[in-house]
Amino acid sequence: GAVVSQHPSRVICKSGTSVKIECRSLDFQATTMFWYRQFPKQSLMLMATSNEGSKATYEQGVEKDKFLINHASLTLSTLTVTSAHPEDSSFYICSARERGTFFGPGTRLTVL
Amino acid sequence: GDSVTQMEGPVTLSEEAFLTINCTYTATGYPSLFWYVQYPGEGLQLLLKATKADDKGSNKGFEATYRKETTSFHLEKGSVQVSDSAVYFCALIPTGGGNKLTFGTGTQLKVEL
């Protein structure tokens, strides 16, 4: 099946810094990718839909200036958490669609 | 809006026990229904799906039947193994909803020898 990778798998950063998370479709092209956030013992929450070559579509309540999404190519979408704070600590998961939805392994962000 | 409700975990079973994880949904029309599994340290993987009422999705010994009358999609397996230990997510895509998945909160399953 199709493979989606994320990098890094874990990141620890200081409060106030920015962190970039990459999502790649390894063996297929994805015009649309999705970014989710998963809190402990809670559901995956869709943050935004990333469209190649155009602006991302954010879900209600998600700050687009804080969570910058860039879908620069058909195989890469990036999520940048700007000026991160401890409350941004979470598990971030991306997915890409190609005759089905395939998920990346997730990135654990810890903001100190 | 659309939502998915799952039973809270963790669910702890002995190997070869029967598994049921309940899932009910709220949505208009006929959504597509899914079960995803997340093994430790890995991303979500599609386990099975059903796209219309009375459909039964099945994979790796797991089954779930789309029940429109009870708005349910309960996951079952007749005999669980230790390797089935994971978090299971029920999800839906609403009628005409494109690619947007709405997830339940996940149910952790622990299978012991």
Image (spheres, rainbow, N blue to C red):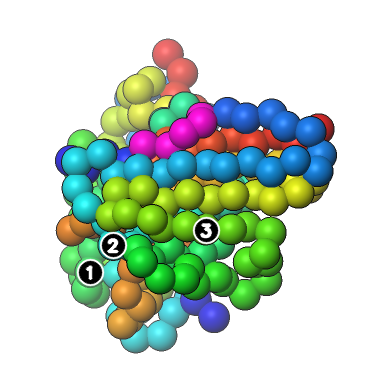
Identify the disc placed on residue B51.
1
Q: Are dots 2 and 3 in contact, CB under 8 Å?
A: no
Q: Nearer the viewer, mark 1 or mark 3?
A: 3
Viewer-nearest of discs 2 and 1: 2
- Residue B71 picture location, percent across and down: 40, 73
> Horizontal placement of B44 versus B6: left or right?
left
Query: Of marks 2 and 3, which one's residue comes earlier in the chain?
Result: 2
Q: Where, by quadrant of the figure, is residue A12 drawn? A: top right
Q: Is residue A7 found inside the magenta-colored segment of the image? A: yes
Whether tag 1 and tag 3 are in contact, CB under 8 A, the answer is no
Type of residue at label 2?
Answer: Thr
What amino acid type should be assigned to the residue bearing mark 3?
Answer: Ile
Residue A50 lies in the magenta stretch: no
Of helix, strand and loop, which one carries label 3?
strand
| Kind of residue indicated by mark 1 | Thr
Give the secondary structure at mark 1.
loop
Give the residue number, with chain letter if any, for mark 3. A69
Please tell me whether residue B105 is drawn above or below residue B53 in the rendered image: above
B48 w.r.t. B44: above or below: below
Chain ID of residue with mark 3: A
Q: CA distance from mark 2 to mark 3?
A: 14 Å
Q: Which chain's residue wears label 1?
A: B
